[in-house]
Image (tube, rainbow, N blue to C red):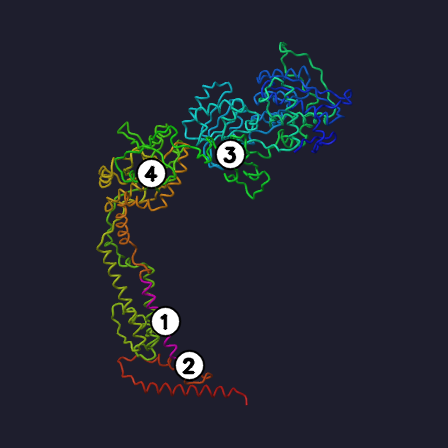
Amino acid sequence: MAGARMSFSHVTSHFVPLFLLLVHLPRAHSSTNQSTQVDVGIIMGLGSMVGKASQTSIKLAIEDFYSHHENSTTRLALHWIDSELHVFNAGMQALDLVKNKGVQAIIGPQTSTGAKFLANLGTKTKVPILSFSATSSFISSTRTPYFIRATLNDSTQAKPIASLFQAYNWRQAIAIYEDTEYGTGLIPFLTDAFQEIGSRIEDRTILSISASDEFIVKKLYKLKHMQTRVFVVHMNPQFASRLFRKALQLDMMSKEYAWIITDELASFLNCMDPLALASMQGVLGVKSYITESKALANLSARWKEIYKKEFPNEKAEEIPTISTVALRAYDAAWALALAIENSGQFRHPTHKKFTQNSPNFTVPRKSLSGPKLLRSILKTKFSGYSGHIQFIKGELQASAFQIVNIVEDGVKEIGFWTARNGLSRRLKHEKQNYSARSSDLGRVVWPGGSMVEPRGWVVSPKGVKLRIGVPRKKYGSGVAGFSREVFLAVINALPYSFAYKLVAFEKGEGANARTYDDLIYQVYLKNFDAVVGDVTIRANRSNYVDFTIPYLNSGVAMVVPVKKDDKTKDAWVFLKPLTWRLWVMSGLSFVLTGFVVWALEHRSNKDFRGTKTHQLGVVLSFSFSTMFFAHKETVASNLGRFVVTIWLFVVLILNSSYTASLTSMLTVQQLQPTVTNIDTLIKNGDYIGCQPRSFIRELLKRLHVNESKLKTYDNFDEYAEALSKGSQNGGISAYFEEVPYIKLFLSNYCDRFTMVGPTYRTAGFGFVFPKGSPLVSDVSKAILEVVEGNKMLTLNKLWLHNETSCRIMREEWDSKSSNGLSINNFKGLFLITGLASAMALLTVFVRFLNKHLKRQRNSLFWEGFLAKAHFNLQHSNEPTFKRREQRDGEVENKVESDTLTVVQGEVRNHMENKIPN
């Protein structure tokens, strides 16, 4: 916005009329004699580029302020001090200004290092220190309340820089910064911002501002041979010019490189030497955004004219344009003049004369007007040329950052960053959510003129083959070979290739024996670039190296010998062929079938008649006797024969299955583990086997296994022999190993040993890389592709195929040692016999209804039904015949018909008597 200014009565925001900004010469002050002079110190390196630009801005701001405020009651008397950018000089001169000059405020110093000392001095003397260029986060208004930061805190640019890493998917960075308060202040905040997005600073290169060109080249040469290719540069413009010239000479401004510069350096790009700018082609910059306007253009032109007059010896091509720092200096001077005007009368204490040679080197008295002036400064609020001026917690607040790209034609804007939207091409573009993608920015020209986004790292910066360590083992070669084959498949799945060679890692013997931890530590020592093999992912190992995601799941389990289980001595073995549910279901089916046959036969078959007790016995004895085909009752009806035939088939299947299962249990001896848990081993004091110098040894110790009870062997055959002997004969009772090795072991000894007990989970097998290696992410993605594809199945069959035969044998044993036949084995048979019985009962009921509906009227239907029921009940209670008689169907039907007629007549007469005449 245009440079708007404050009124005297209120600290509110408004704009300066454009005609006032066109004034080139100060107007005559009409009330000079009535104005109170207020002494203000200015401390900066007046001979530096920033010092010259800031000096011009401050003079112009004071001139514009009093031209605009003709009736002001105060006037600033500026005391210019050249610190030559030395902290000691700045401190001594600040003491002199406060003690001998009686200054009420100090603008400066130029550097963060000097500002730290002056901030403490201002807090003790209650003299406000207003700095427009000290951006270090180490200086806080909380600890030094009289320090006012009229610029942005360096910490505010950490997230915009991190958003670029998020947009281009960079995971590592190298920070290059100067060894000053300003240089180191940004790094902690940048580290935190990177951690939030999953990136990190791999290396921190600190350069002294007095470093020679040779030293800079040495440092850059070291960085050139690192994998990371993204650099964040945080230093002053003069020093950065030297750095980029040397980087260009070392061919570090070429393809595959990415350079990012911070706010102060990016803000000075339009003031830098063209040769220095030419060495920075392709660099990205993050700078605080300054709104362009006609008023700013007018101010820039006036500023340049005054700069020429102040420094007439400057060459025309060396005269800079107004920078962000110069604009902040302008706004800082205006804010101080406005605050002094609004604070009222000043009280000037008497000061004792002080010189550097004086022995009275003490802190001056506290300013009487300082607290009131501080409050006035903190209340100041207006729209300045550098942005909105308002001091919240003693410093300005960031609103937006501009992302720029240095190209051949100059500096090109490619986007913006705000806390609300993230990255965007237009500042006023509103987005629903925060985002940071490369598509949110304009097209970037990268170093070397490349239009391809840099990956941010290279596999082999020195152009040599990667040294990949592989363990050499005496056993378990199948797993080791499997690991190498998986690695080759993963490399082929990567979108790029790199040269490497496999280097065997000898484990040694005896006292010289080395462990997997030793192998992994070689990566930490940079003797190996990676490790490929059956390396278990462990928490303690991840402190030194990075692991990929696991390519093979693992865990620790126990191998023990098996023993034969003789079940012939079990008194209740005859019940085990069938599960208890099947026993219950079979019994219910027997009873149900007997009832259905009785229901079908008892009306017309004398074998199923008699007393209630007799009929119940018939139901139970008939169904159960069919199991041995010993039933004596004759089934007369067709439906009864149908039900019995189906039931006899079911009984035949049940009988045969029971006989076969019982025979198997009595003749085949089952294989059972000798031990089922580690607690039994500990209690019995048995010996346990494990790999020498393995993490399993530490695991067993944590499980309270006595170390003296642990034995180690060299190969699978020795472990098998030791397990066969047992602890009592100098061997071991159990062998603890990782599951992949157990599968290989059991593939050769399935008939003698088995895996039992709980599996102690581990993270699995993974590949090892140096801490922070960018290969970890890409290799992990490639592992997912291989694991989800057919390649992993092929490798399993090729290297771990023997476990299949072992699994088949185990399944056979499991089936033999099962708890018996279950109801699931026969639910089809039970369904068939159930449906047959239901269909027979339904058929009889339908025939009964059909017969009597045809013979009688609808109103007399239930009469016949009751009569029929009465007849059946009477005949079902007749004594049981001891011998069978010849049935006479005709006589029986006649008796039934006569009886039915008599009952119907009685019922009809009874109903007629109840009907009124």
Sooner in the amino-acid sequence: mark 2 or mark 4 = 4
Q: Position of residue 432 (x, y in %)?
A: 56, 44
Mark 2 → mark 4, Cα distance in angstroms: 85 Å
User: Principal SS element in the magenta part?
Assistant: helix
Mark 3 → mark 1, Cα distance in angstroms: 77 Å
Asked whether the beta carbons under mark 3 and mark 4 sit within 8 Å of each other, the answer is: no
Sooner in the amino-acid sequence: mark 3 or mark 4 = 3
Badge 2 amino acid: Phe
Quarter holding residue 229: top left
Sooner in the amino-acid sequence: mark 1 or mark 4 = 4
10 Å crowding of disc 1: few (<14), some (14-19), many (20+): few
Residue wearing tag 1: 838
Residue wearing tag 4: 487
Badge 3 amino acid: Ala
Is 458 positioned to the left or the right of 334 in the image?
left
Sooner in the amino-acid sequence: mark 3 or mark 2 = 3
Is 875 positioned to the left or the right of 291 in the image?
left
Which element type, helix, strand or loop, lies under badge 3?
A: helix
Residue wearing tag 3: 162
Residue wearing tag 2: 865
Badge 4 amino acid: Phe
10 Å crowding of disc 4: few (<14), some (14-19), many (20+): many
Mark 1 → mark 4, Cα distance in angstroms: 65 Å
As drawn, 782 above or below 93: below
As drawn, 167 above or below 850: above
Asked whether the beta carbons under mark 2 and mark 4 sit within 8 Å of each other, the answer is: no
Which element type, helix, strand or loop, lies under badge 2?
A: helix
